[in-house]
Amino acid sequence: MPPVAPFDAHMLPEALRGWVADIAHRMQCPIDFPAVGAVVALSGLIGARAVVAPKARDDWRVVPNLWGQIVGRPGVMKSPALAQVLAPLQRLEAAEREQWKAAHEAWELDCKVAELAAKQNEKQAAVQASKDPAKARALLQPADLPAEPVARRYLVNDATVEKLADLLTVNPWGLTVFRDELHGLLCAMDRQGQEGARGFYLTGYDGNQGHAVDRVGRGESFVPRVCLAMLGGIQPGKVQSYVREAVAGGAGDDGLLQRFGLTVWPDVAPEFVYVDQWPDTPAKQAAWAVFERLNALQPVADTDPQEWRFTPEAQDLFVKWLVPFETELRGEALHPALVSHLAKYRKLVPALALIFALVDTPESAGLIHDRELIRALAWADYLRTHAERLYAAAVIPETAGAHALLAKIRAGKLQDSDGTKWQAFEPWRVSVKGWAGLTSAEAVRKAANVLADYGWLAREAVPTGASGGRPGERFLVHPALLKRVAA
């Protein structure tokens, strides 16, 4: 796989740095995992309450909600690391739920009092009906009740699109969607009949668009603003398989995967170091205080977010980055899948700069300085190396498939259900086994051709039957491999 850049803790705002580094150290996981999780969690907390104008005079606005996925084998502490950085959101939600519970109980009492008053008024109205009809009508007027309290939500784990639409109606500034295993969500949206769900999530990435949701038996409902941050983990084999299918023009070829701009696939240290120490409490308190402060961030009005802009120095720096970046995307040197991914950096870079400004310089009168933009550009350089590793599954799929096929042969997996080993095989026979990266006859054929080029397999034409048609092809396994399997 292509090499990736290591994560530099100085790319994080100082208030988050010690907390994230402490989590990674105590868990002995790559620091990339909690770093990405923390940034996505903050992006969802900010939501659409603040936006950035990347150009000085244009009406282009960027909502800072971001999507992140961490790629790693089972057992490398993906889930525990993300649980740690999502804990501040969970605490905010627990506190909100307690406040809502008290407010809702008070509201229920008000409703009961109003109901009793209405019954009393009804009795009085019956007495006044013949004497003073106007007074009777006044007594029967319904009482004005306060609106039912609604609990603010921060984190959603497993919800249908219909439920998400309901939640966003009462949480119009946005939510964070967390899925411990993203592959299940991605594959679910690939299924026939899930086009509406897929479109809903695609809209949620922009963070400032409305979306209509059709409900069975309930008609259509419209969400004025769909703003979703998204975070989760995924295993290497599953993400490679998904990338291949998406790039090959499958159901996933609509840019959904490319919206995960905060994708990291770090190298994991080969040796585990036992660490047993208390969490860094001052660092944790400093980081959680940032979440508390941003939780109170207020938009300009009920429907208008805060608007942040670059300082003149930061604006010049942004232009110096954007022009060569856009020029590269228009060239022919990059794989189309990688171009589609990198194109989302138009949002990623200014969004990161805004998040860092809200963390570092909340009192800067809506101005993003060059320091925050430099940090965002450092993230872009770092994340690009991880994107190149991710899309290597599409750029060189035959090589990856060849490695996978050779591993299966060496492990003795090419066999019938009764254990009879294959000395030769047709590609379709391997594809039906459903191994990652080898799920189609064409993928197996390409992988087998690579192994044939290196001498591990030999190609053999299969004569056509009586009905004619194009000759088939099968591959003979090298005797040395068969002996190794037999041993």
Image: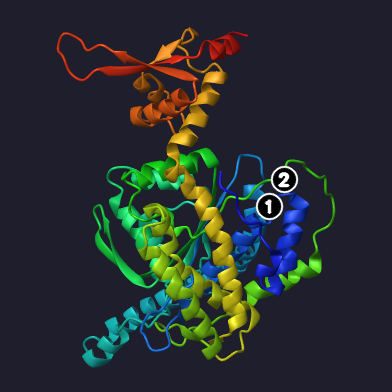
Q: Is residue 116 above or below residue 266?
A: below
Q: Is residue 235 above or below residue 94?
A: above
How far across and how far down the image is residue 454, in percent?
49, 25
Q: Earlier in the sequence, mark 2 or mark 1?
A: 1
Q: Residue at x 22, y 89 (%)?
A: 133
Label 1, residues with CA under 10 Å away: few <14, some 14-19, many ≥20: many
Q: Is residue 468 left or right of residue 33?
A: left
**Numbered badge on residue 269:** 2
Q: Is residue 210 above or below residue 177?
A: below
Foreground pick, 469 / 242: 469
Residue 179 appears in the picture as rendered: no
Examine the image and state in which quarter residue 137 appears: bottom left
Instruction: Look at mark 1 in the image and give the residue it sits on.
Output: 30
Q: Residue at x 38, y 23 (%)?
A: 432
Amino acid type, callout 2: Ala
Mark 2 or 1: in front is 2
Q: In the displayed orientation, state which residue is furthest to the right.
A: 277
Q: Quadrant of the N terminus?
A: top right
Label 2, residues with CA under 10 Å away: few <14, some 14-19, many ≥20: few
Q: Residue at x 50, y 49 (%)?
A: 390
Q: Residue at x 48, y 46 (%)?
A: 392
Foreground pick, 144 / 9: 9
